[in-house]
Image: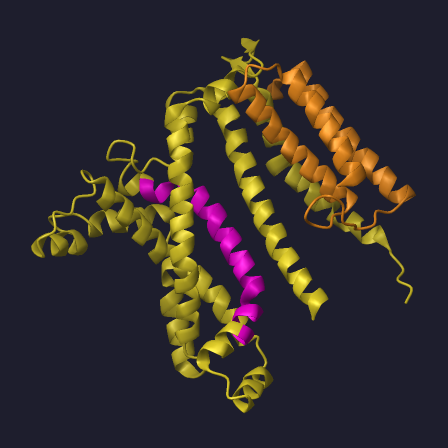
């Protein structure tokens, strides 16, 4: 079959390209410019070369923030993805129950980050918060401002509460798109519930899960407002994630050069992980199609 | 463009990137890329290999600058060599 390639349609994305140039490309170029200079004001600036990069890469506080960030992102992914799939499998398929459950499940997604932080801040207070007070009454000395374990646990539960619905929602829509014939065939084969999940539902969910995991990774890697409101990065620096370190540096101390260098490193990490992940999943699919 | 606080190195950097993209476009028009499998574990198009090359060049520069006493020019030389190898055999 002879395919005729007509690339004229690419011209249609030109307006979008112009928009992206102003919203992303030019600002990013400015960041690159700042990262090699020490800028005081419009007229006073010094070229520093790679100095900021050397400083940022060897900063122990940033290195530990990076490790914490990875630990956090991996933890929430490991909890949210299986949990989201589980919830999606349990959700009713039709009738008014389906709509009702859908709304209930999606509710946390509608709450802004800062508000989520405030809700949990109050929820976990020892004197008036239901969770904080309840845990204390049960005999556990729960205090997110003193114990790093408590702070970590709470931030993870908060993120799971806020974002598992996204995975559940994506999986739910993925599950709905599986034709009934697949299930009928499975029943004829007397396939077990597990076999149906493993060989019908999970493969059909791959696409939505790729999107879900990518979104969740990027979101959680850039998390800022929720832990900032909840713990302020403490106790000590035990819940200070990358974006908060960056904000402290860029806004608090006005160190534009170092924070530009740091932003670029941050950006490169997100770019690499997202690309590796996307490529890996896409190739898995290609192999499967090639083999079948 | 003064507000963007350009310096000579960053100007050269972005000009080279822009030239690369323009060059790749011309190359694509003259001779469209074919997806193939080289020494990389995945099959790639020419543009994929350029992206991989640039991304790994960024990391190479960071590693060399941050954790070795070597000059950044070694990183640049290594990256150019790596990019050429990648485009040809990757």
Near-viewer residue (A68 or A122) = A68
Which residue is found at the position 38% from the left and 20% from the top?
A253
Residue A290: give x, y in percent of width and height: 72, 65
The answer to whether A65 is drawn above or below residue A40 in the figure is below
- Extreme-front residue of the structure: B39
Residue A23: give x, y in percent of width and height: 60, 38
Which residue is found at the position 32% from the left and 39% from the top?
A228
Which residue is found at the position 56% from the left and 64% from the top?
A206
A235 vs A63, left or right, is left
B75 vs B28, left or right, is left
- Extreme-bottom residue of the structure: A188
In the image, the chain rendered in yellow is A
Asked if the magenta segment contains residue B11, the reply would be no
**Can residue A105 be seen from the camera position used here?**
yes
Which residue is found at the position 42% from the left and 20% from the top?
A254
Question: What's the magenta bit mostly, secondary-structure-wise?
Answer: helix
From the image, state the color of chain B.
Answer: orange
Colour setting:
by chain
- Identify the image quadrant of the C terminus of chain A: bottom right
Report the span colored magenta: A199-227
A269 vs A288, left or right, is left
């Amino acid at each position: 079959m002879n395919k005729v390639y007509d690339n004229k349609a690419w011209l249609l994305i030109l307006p979008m390209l112009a928009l992206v140039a102003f919203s992303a490309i030019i600002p990013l170029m400015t960041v690159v410019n700042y990262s090699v200079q020490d800028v005081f004001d419009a007229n006073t600036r010094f070229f520093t070369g790679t100095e900021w990069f050397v400083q940022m890469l060897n900063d122990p506080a940033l290195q530990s923030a990076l490790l914490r960030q990875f630990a956090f992102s991996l933890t929430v992914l490991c909890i949210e993805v299986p949990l989201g799939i589980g919830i999606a499998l349990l959700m009713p398929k039709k009738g008014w129950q389906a709509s009702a459950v859908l709304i209930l499940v999606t509710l946390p997604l509608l709450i802004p980050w800062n508000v989520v932080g405030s809700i949990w801040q109050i929820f976990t207070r020892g004197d008036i918060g239901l969770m904080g007070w309840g845990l204390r009454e049960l005999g556990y000395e729960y205090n997110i401002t003193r114990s790093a374990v408590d702070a970590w646990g709470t931030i993870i539960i908060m993120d799971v509460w806020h974002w598992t619905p996204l995975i559940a929602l994506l999986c739910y829509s993925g599950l709905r798109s599986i034709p009934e014939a697949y299930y009928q065939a499975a029943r004829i084969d007397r396939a077990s519930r597990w076999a149906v999940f493993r060989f019908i539902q999970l493969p059909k969910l791959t696409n939505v899960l790729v999107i879900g995991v990518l979104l969740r990774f990027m979101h959680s890697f850039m998390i800022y407002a929720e832990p900032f409101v909840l713990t302020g990065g403490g106790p000590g620096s035990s819940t200070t994630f990358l974006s908060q370190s960056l904000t402290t540096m860029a806004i608090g101390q006005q160190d534009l050069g170092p924070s530009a260098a740091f932003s670029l490193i941050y950006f490169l990490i997100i770019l690499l992980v997202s690309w590796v992940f996307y490529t890996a999943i896409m190739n898995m699919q290609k192999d499967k199609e090639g083999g079948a | 463009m003064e507000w963007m606080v350009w310096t000579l190195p960053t100007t050269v950097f972005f000009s080279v990137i822009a030239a690369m993209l323009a060059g790749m476009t011309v190359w694509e028009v003259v001779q469209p890329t074919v997806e193939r499998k080289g020494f990389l574990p995945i099959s790639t198009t020419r543009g994929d290999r350029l992206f991989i090359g640039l991304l790994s060049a960024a990391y190479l520069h960071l590693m060399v600058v941050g954790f070795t006493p070597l000059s950044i020019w070694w990183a640049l030389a290594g990256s150019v060599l790596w990019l050429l190898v990648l485009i040809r055999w990757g």
